Amino acid sequence: MLGLILVGFSLVALPLVVSVIQALVYMDRLAQQSERLVMRSIQVTRQNQLLAEQITALERNARQYLVLNDPELLSLYEEKQQRFDLTLNTLEGLVHDETIMSYLQRMRSDSETIVQLLREQRLNDETALVEQFSRLGEMAVWIAAQSYYFIDREQTSLQDTASDAS
């Protein structure tokens, strides 16, 4: 008799135990997704700040090269350009949005055009240089804003998923 009561109780409690385990697994997944989103947000913010700093450093270096026409400054510019490309690559890996990706590609293309013009000494006018870097700066601001919007959309999606679970 006691055995039947225990079996009956187990059969009644089993769905509840399974539901609790499923809820714990689901909450753990949500916590992991949330943690990844926070980490990616931090990385995107850092990379966007680095991008803005690199544009400023590239412009400063390009202006120095225009004034002094020192080959070492061009070499330094090319090194900074490579770091700039790495930052663009990192952002491409963090933000999977076609519009942002197209702007990152355009930034890469524009920055390569600048270095090519400097190499060929076809960029003698400081005004033209300022315009080139101004465009890069504007794109960097746009990319930062869109990156934050992209992260916000992911956060909203995660919140909706969590709301559906409750």
Image: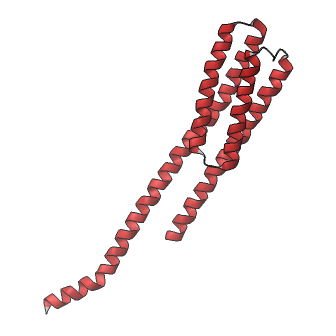
Q: Is residue 127 left or right of residue 49?
A: right
The answer to whether 138 appears left or right of 88 in the picture is right
- Picture coordinates of residue 89, whole percent (x, y): 59, 36
- Residue 20's image quarter? bottom left
Give the residue displayed 65% in from the left and 26% down from the top.
54
Q: Position of residue 134 (x, y in %)?
A: 79, 29
The reply, left or right, for residue 111 in relation to residue 127 is left
- Which of 91/25 is in front? 91
The residue at the far front in this view is 120
Q: Residue 82 location, x and y as percent?
A: 61, 25
The relative height of residue 14 versus residue 166 in the rendered view (above or below) is below
Residue at 73% of width from left, 12% of height from top? 64
Q: Position of residue 124 (x, y in %)?
A: 83, 14
Residue that sits furthest to the bottom in the current view: 1
Determine if residue 166 is in view.
Answer: no
Task: Tell me the residue at 49%/49% (across/down).
Answer: 36
Question: Which quarter of the rendering shows the N terminus?
Answer: bottom left
The one of 38 and 2 positioned closer to us in this rendering: 38
> Hey, which quadrant is residue 137 in on the image?
top right
